[in-house]
Amino acid sequence: MRILVVEDDPALRLGITRTLQAEGWQVDAVTDGEYALAATATESYDAAVLDLGLPRRDGFGVLQHWRGAGHDLAVLILTARDELPDRLRGLNAGADDYLAKPFEPEELVARLRAVTRRRLGSASNLLAVGALQFNTDSRELRLRDERLPLTPREAALIELLMASPGTAVPKSRIVSAMSSWEANFSPNLVEIYILKLRRKLVDAAADVAIVTVRGVGYAMEPA
Ligand code: CA
């Protein structure tokens, strides 16, 4: 999952970024509303953590622009105080949920999980293909009862493939989901990660296969 953090307070921005990265998510962080719009104009995000009080263009303006342009990323707004008018205005402008400062890192992660799950229309945190199950909350991959260890990037790749079994995931989408500005992900690395995952699945005798869809990308299918 790739997340945009929009927060002008440097300490808070860094804290949120580190918290979300620790969950294995790819995070880009920007300091104001104009940078937020520039980021979503060129990159594709699953979710945004959006502060309301921002320089240049405030969070309401960013949100209105996103929704007006049809961006369907999940948006969690941060309000400085637990003020009803701000919350209502944000929710009316298309935010999925809000969090009042100060907040605990655990609550931020839990709210973000909930809003992205809602927006993806999925009631469950389990993705399944054949006997393979991936838990999008704990980031654990299990084959029947056996846990298969994954690196955070392998988990990101498995999540993408298992979210739409039998459908080719474009290579560009994989690169975008596995990149952040802090750690760029070269398209050449996709093949290396696919090879690693295939080997893990074969070694575990999983009943699924990652097939190459020529000129498009990769798809996971029951074997
Ligand atoms: Ca602020």
Image (spheres, helix red, strand yellow):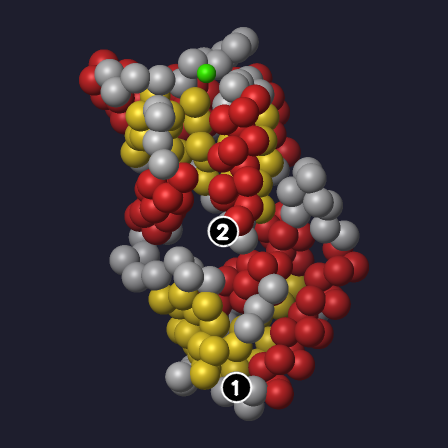
Mark 1, residues whose alpha carbon is within 10 Å: few (<14), some, or many (≥20)? some
The residue shown at (78%, 59%) is 188
Q: Could you tell me the amino acid type at mark 1?
A: Ala
Mark 2, residues whose alpha carbon is within 10 Å: few (<14), some, or many (≥20)? some
Report if the CB atoms under discs 2 and 1 are less than 8 Å apart.
Answer: no
CA separation in Å, label 2 and label 1: 26 Å
Percent x, y of residue 37: 55, 24
Side (left or right) of 65 relative to 215: left
Look at the picture and state if 15 lies above or below 46.
above
The residue shown at (39%, 34%) is 75
Q: Check disc 1 and report the residue beneath it.
A: 206
Percent x, y of residue 38: 61, 25
| Image-quadrant location for residue 137 | bottom left
Q: Which of marks 2 and 1 is nearer the N terminus?
A: 2
| Circle on res. 150 | none
Percent x, y of residue 98: 31, 30
Q: Could you tell me the amino acid type at mark 2?
A: Glu
The residue shown at (45%, 83%) is 146
Most distant residue in the left direction: 84
Q: Check disc 2 and report the residue beneath it.
A: 23
Look at the picture and state if 114 lies above or below 170.
above
Residue situated in front as seen by the camera: 168 or 163: 163
Percent x, y of residue 1: 51, 50
